[in-house]
Image (spheres, rainbow, N blue to C red):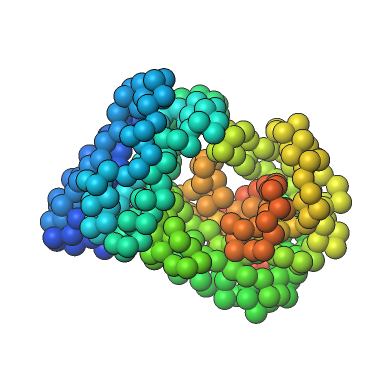
Amino acid sequence: MPDNAARLARTILSRNLGLKKGNSVVIESWTHTLPYTRAFVDEARRLGAQPTVLYEDETAWWNAVAAKRTGPFSHLSSVEKAAVGNADAYVYFWGPADMRKAIDLGTFSSKFIGFNEEWYTAARKGGLRGYRMSLGLASDATAKRFGLAGPAWRERLVKAGAVDAGEMLATGNRVAKRISGASELRIRHPNGTDLRIAVHGARMTVAGGIPSGATKDRPRGMLEGNPSGQLFAALDGKDAAGTFVSNRTVFDMGRYDKYAGSKWSFKDGRLTDHSTTVGRDLFEKAFGAAPKGKDRLAYLSIGLNPEARDLPPCEDTEEGAILLGIGNNQVAGGRSRIPFTGYAMLGGGTLTVDGKPIARGGRIV
């Protein structure tokens, strides 16, 4: 791990963020992510920058939860506000380690992030840029829930996170340009997938993994996820016809569920028939309760990351993989806001735009 962690830190701090001598970087870490934090501290100092580590002890945090000591979490301390407001870069490792246990706290958990808006206000004012590291979500506790091997999962996240963001951004922009002037996108795979989607006028966004800072449209845009690498196309009102058969698992990190074995049929842009194997009951319950628009093909994403494979919570970054979403499409910059999103994902397929290939066999061409 040390060599790969060092490569990850170098890619993020030196290449993606352009940290230079005399700059400052705040690194926020939990107990389970300290081995990776060391690599970022070492890299910052190699560059001549000054790292500051904000550390949250896992046991102490859960002690506060058990005692319901929410007061200290209701606002940002003056010290942290100054650090965030004056730093040049920021790296955050998710925690606590057992996020599912934290989610099970329900609305009570919100009291332990009461300082959030103050944090983002300070970050925007100071022009901060940085990353949320998905490595923090890949704890052994979470791996056990998903049936994964924690060390192998983390190693895959490290490798995918160290891919040059500039290269993915360039690839994504090239693909977006090809789609923007096209009429139809076709997805095929020997597993029975053959789906045609009208894409003329689709709104596209490339998430290459380089934070550009907060904007009016993206008030929290100063932070990017890592690993990254996706092209999103919002498909409000677009036509779609055919069948899409998934061969990849989609992980829901909000509820710590997973979905696989989906087969979706579309006509006139709407889902006309569907089935799911893994996660079937959860999908059917959510789909059945969802309002009008739940069956509309809302967006698709194309993965751009050559090192991503079986990589929750970033499985949709796999190069050449296509994720379909029905219902809500705000994540892709669309206008559908209904409280439901369904996902299905295909890897290794062939993607053509007006008959010309964009992806084949899991690679962008």
Compared to residue 357, the image places residue 110 above or below, namely above
Compared to residue 105, the image places residue 265 above or below, namely below
Query: From the image, which quarter does the C terminus lie in?
Result: bottom right
- Locate residue 119, reporting x and y percent: 35, 50
- Locate residue 174, reporting x and y percent: 52, 73
- Could you tell me which residue is drawn at 76 percent across and 66 percent down? 237
Can residue 277 be spotted in the picture?
Answer: no
Give 147 or 298, whichever is nearer the viewer. Answer: 298
- Could you tell me which residue is drawn at 41 percent across and 50 percent down? 117
| Left/right of residue 141 with respect to residue 182 in the rendered view | left
Give 74 or 359, whichever is nearer the viewer. Answer: 74
Figure quadrant of residue 72 = top left
- Could you tell me which residue is drawn at 81 percent across and 53 percent down? 292
- Locate residue 3, reporting x and y percent: 26, 42
For the view shown, which residue lies furthest in the front direction?
Answer: 71
| Left/right of residue 145 with respect to residue 300 in the rendered view | left
Query: From the image, which quarter does the N terminus lie in?
Result: top left
Number of numbered discs: 0
| Left/right of residue 148 with respect to residue 84 in the rendered view | right
Can residue 41 be spotted in the picture?
Answer: yes
- Could you tell me which residue is drawn at 42 percent across and 55 percent down? 224
- Locate residue 204, reporting x and y percent: 59, 68
Compared to residue 234, the image places residue 119 above or below, namely above
Figure quadrant of residue 248 = top right
Compared to residue 176, the image places residue 14 above or below, namely above
Figure quadrant of residue 212 = bottom left
Give 60 or 313, whichever is nearer the viewer. Answer: 60
For the view shown, which residue lies furthest in the bottom direction?
Answer: 181
